[in-house]
Image: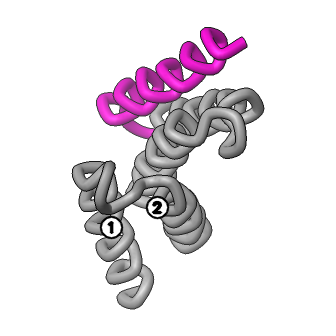
Amino acid sequence: MTGWATTQNNLGNALQNQAARTEGAAGTDLLAEAVTACRGALTVRTRQDHPVDWAITQGNLTICELARADRNATADPLPHLRAALEHVEAALTVYDPEHMSYDHTKATTLRDQIKARLAEV
């Protein structure tokens, strides 16, 4: 099952990358598919059983939700920004600043950027 979850996570990444190059509703649909794929991965990549993989997928969901917030077709970016914040904060519960300093710093920076965007809206 972990191979399937890894495939779902990677599918989410591929769909998000494709969405970045696809305009309009088709790109928005690809982002929704990316979120669905990553959420599927989380059914296996649980925090309890696979904490680092779970945190990585949470980070991927953060990127997907930020991309959804930035789409021209998105009437209200707030739900996506809030979801992105939830996902990055979840990842930070795993990313230890001492033993995973790169991931912790990257996620902390992203969290701070999301909070700043939310303060602007």
- Magenta: main secondary structure equals helix
Q: Is residue 39 left or right of residue 83?
A: right
Q: Position of residue 120 (x, y in %)?
A: 36, 88
In this rendering, the count of numbered labels is 2
**Observer-nearest of 78 and 92:** 92
- The reply to whether residue 61 is visible in this rendering is yes
Residue 65, position as x, y percentages in the image: 50, 53
94 vs 85: above or below:
above
Above or below for 66 versus 59: below
Residues at circles 2 and 1 in contact by the CB criterion of under 8 Å: yes
The magenta-colored residue range is 1-25
Label 2 SS: helix
Q: Residues within 10 Å of mark 1 (few under 14, many from 20)?
A: some
Amino acid type of disc 2?
Leu
Say which residue appears at 63% left-offset and 28% top-offset: 37
For residue 30, side relative to residue 112 (left or right): right
Query: Which quadrant is the C terminus positioned in?
Result: bottom left
Residue at 33% x, 35% y is: 20
Quickly name the residue at label 2.
92
Q: CA distance from mark 2 to mark 1?
A: 7 Å
Pointer 1: what residue?
Answer: 108
Residue 88 is marked as: none
Q: Is residue 33 magenta?
A: no
